[in-house]
Image (cartoon, rainbow, N blue to C red):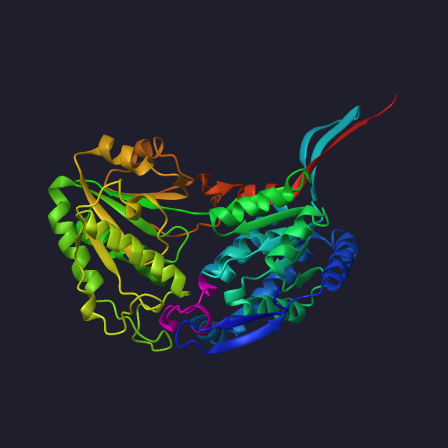
Amino acid sequence: MSDKVQIVSPIDDSVVAQRPVARDSEIEDAIATARGSQRAWARVSVGERARICLAMLDSMLAMQEDLTVELARMMGRPVRYGGEMGGFAERTRHMAAIAREALAPLTIEDTDQSRRLIAREPLGVVLVIAPWNYPYLTAVNTIVPALIAGNAVILKAASQTLLTGERFQRAFEEAGMQESVFEHLVMSHAQTEKLIASRAVDHVTFTGSVAGGRAIERAAAGSFIGVGLELGGKDPAYVRADADLDHAIENLVDGAFFNSGQSCCGIERIYVAEELFDRFVDGFAATTGSYVLDDPRDEATTLGPMAQARGADLVREQIAAALRAGARAHIDTRRFPRHGGPGSPWLAPQVLTRVDHQMAVMREESFGPVVGIMPVAGDDAAIELMNDSAYGLTASLWTRDRDAAQALGGRLRTGTVFMNRCDYLDPALVWTGVKDTGRGQSLSVLGYQALTRPKSYHLRSVP
């Protein structure tokens, strides 16, 4: 095991930073201290815990300009999009606003004879394992509600975006957080699995690959700790015959290629009503061709490099295999001077037609700037294809008929159904997935339930 973690920028292969991996004894001490601090933290009022999380948000917002450039260097997202603080702020404020009601006891009876209620208590120490693609947005989904609910939190940031853990630490310190209630640790995969298996933590949330989720479940087997997993995705869109075509094209291009396609809920496959198909593809390809693939620190850039060359190579392989099987590519990659070959993180966006579900690009997660588009005869054909996937995070429907969208949504095996939008997390709605996308829930009132345990009180008076 290496004793250091090094962040290598996909922009130019420069070393952004390196940090030492924590020693096993340091991890043990941090967990023990967090557990002691959590007991005192749980006695702090919900309102005060929420206030500190909102103060943490203020500190993060004060760092926003630096955070945005730092993210561009670490994982390649263009600075023109302003980092992740917009959604970060929305989620933090919403979870703070609903905390009192969400965590309030449920009173069943309160009479002279009997008081019966169900209270919610913190789990204890929560381990958050964050990914590199949205290291702030995914982490905040658990960190803020876990802390407001009275838990202590240990954050393991992804190696590619390790500095985000330090930013969280600094923001909480500036907010006046009690010592050791929040802590970020630099750990190896082996150390993380050992920590989970030891039952030293009470709950773990993980966002990442299906293989990573399986490793977490194996580590937690028999420990009886809670596990929340957001794993792979192959999110579909269906453009119905009654869709607003221009609106669908503009938003679906963004949904497919924002963050170089490295989004958990990014659009990876599109099904279009036959009568709209040619016009949709022409418009989609034209809009995609206007993207600028260049240095993400340049305000004119709309597409940066992928975070890692191996991810780009996977997408290259999927595109090449689809073309060999008869697919048609609509984007001339020579229009993108930065576009690289094998071993390069620089990858131009690609739009494919004449695809089918025998092709990996329509079946397996791509997590990169490629999308396949197929014509469909109608709703039934679209729903069948949308459900023909091992994953189920989100699905989007593009139509003018809201009743039809809700009815079709009831037939989709997915965690979230969108109409006329995609790639967005509403903090008032639960974020969850089905099938190989994982299990568990975050955000909304239900997110608080996942980070607390119910406790029943049956208090009977004696005459």
Q: Nearer the viewer, residue 72 or 421?
A: 72
Q: Nearer the viewer, residue 214 or 236?
A: 214
- Quarter of the rendering containing residue 344: bottom left
Residue sitting at the far right = 463
Residue 412 within the magenta-colored segment of the rendering? no
Residue 321 percent coordinates (x, y): 25, 51
Q: Quadrant of the N terminus?
A: bottom right
Residue shown at 41% from the left, 43% from the top: 393
Residue 460 percent coordinates (x, y): 82, 25
Q: Nearer the viewer, residue 349 or 166?
A: 349
Asked whether the viewer can see residue 420, the reply is no
Residue 286 percent coordinates (x, y): 16, 61
Residue shown at 38% from the left, 58% from the top: 262
- Quarter of the rendering containing residue 239: top left
Relative to 264, is 387 on the left or the right?
A: left
Relative to 216, say whether 179 is above or below.
below
Residue shown at 60% from the left, 65% from the top: 56
Q: In the rendered picture of this protein, how many numbered marks are placed on residues?
A: 0
Q: Quadrant of the C terminus?
A: top right
Asked whether the viewer can see residue 365, the reply is yes
Relative to 29, is 50 on the left or the right?
A: left
Q: Which residues are magenta?
A: 73-86
Relative to 417, say whether 22 is above or below.
below
Q: Nearer the viewer, residue 430 or 183?
A: 183
Residue 30 percent coordinates (x, y): 74, 61
Relative to 443, say whether 407 is above or below.
above
